[in-house]
Image (spheres, rainbow, N blue to C red):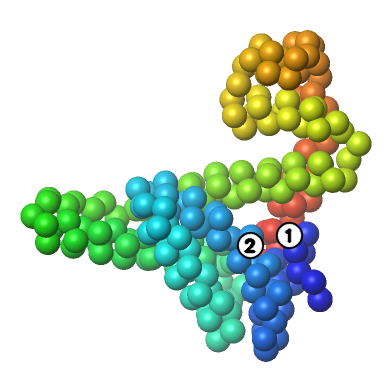
Amino acid sequence: MNYDLSVTTSALLEGLCEPDNEAAWLGLDNRYRPILVATARRFGLSDADAHDVAQETMVRVLQGCRDGKYDREKGRLRTWILTIARHRIVDMHRKRDVRKEARGVSAVMETPEESTIEACWSAEERAAILREALDALRTDSNLASETIEAFELQVLHRRGPHQVAEHLQCSINDVYLAKSRVTRKLKDMVTHIETRWNDA
């Protein structure tokens, strides 16, 4: 079976139970690693440390799934992954602070609260889902690439309508229409993706 971002999380988890199912692992990894890296960065970790946190977290998730440590009856997959990630983020801060103290630099670490990490994760997850939806629009809809670009510039890059119109050499009305058209198409697509991602 070929796993990609369109597959449900439940299907990916089932695939992990099959010996040597690398496709299921890659599917789960592609879905969650970028969110983990972005979340770790939000807590002040360097790019390298954030990638290390993501790597350690995903390895523990893989091993935990195969060892039967994830129990759907006790909570959602994202909650379990967040718990693992939080410990890895705290560990990484401790290592960094130990290195600072060894150099004689004062280091005080505030342990991130679960609710704070969850809020950061949710924001990054929404952004990842929106990116997937926009990618799908580019390949599966009849919207012009300029229309999607106008939406991205306004919503993702927070450019004003006048800036967007000047950049794309179109009218202000075209910019507003582009945002409206893409928003309508995105609504159902985002809901569909969220359902697939959050079914476990």
Amino acid on which the number 2 mark rests in the picture: Asn
In this rendering, position of residue 13 left or right of residue 37 = right
Residue lying furthest bottom: 19
- 155 vs 132: above or below: above
Q: Where, quadrant-wise, is the N terminus in this rendering?
A: bottom right
Depth check: give the residue in front, 2 or 72: 2
Label count reads 2
Image x and y of residue 67, in percent: 55, 86
Q: Which numbered disc covers residue 69? A: none
- Disc 1 to disc 2, C-alpha distance: 8 Å
Specify the quadrant of the image occupied by residue 86. Answer: bottom left
**Left or right: 185 as drawn, with respect to 13:** right
Crowding at dot 2, Cα within 10 Å, few <14 / some 14-19 / many 20+, comes out as: few
As drawn, the label of residue 5 is 1
Q: Name the residue: 56% across, 77% down.
A: 62
**Image point 81% across, 41% down: which residue?**
138
Would you place residue 148 above or below residue 74 in this image? above
1 vs 120, left or right, is right
**Front-most of 81 and 181?**
181
Residue bearing the label numbered 2? 30
Q: Looking at the picture, how far across and down is residue 33, in whole percent?
A: 55, 61
Q: Is residue 166 visible?
A: yes
Badge 1 vs badge 2, beta-carbon distance below 8 Å: yes
Q: Residue at x 17, y 52 (%)?
A: 107
Q: Would residue 13 be seen by someone viewing this image from the given angle?
A: no
- The quarter of the picture where residue 104 lies is bottom left
Chain-order first, disc 1 or disc 2: 1
Res 169 → quadrant: top right
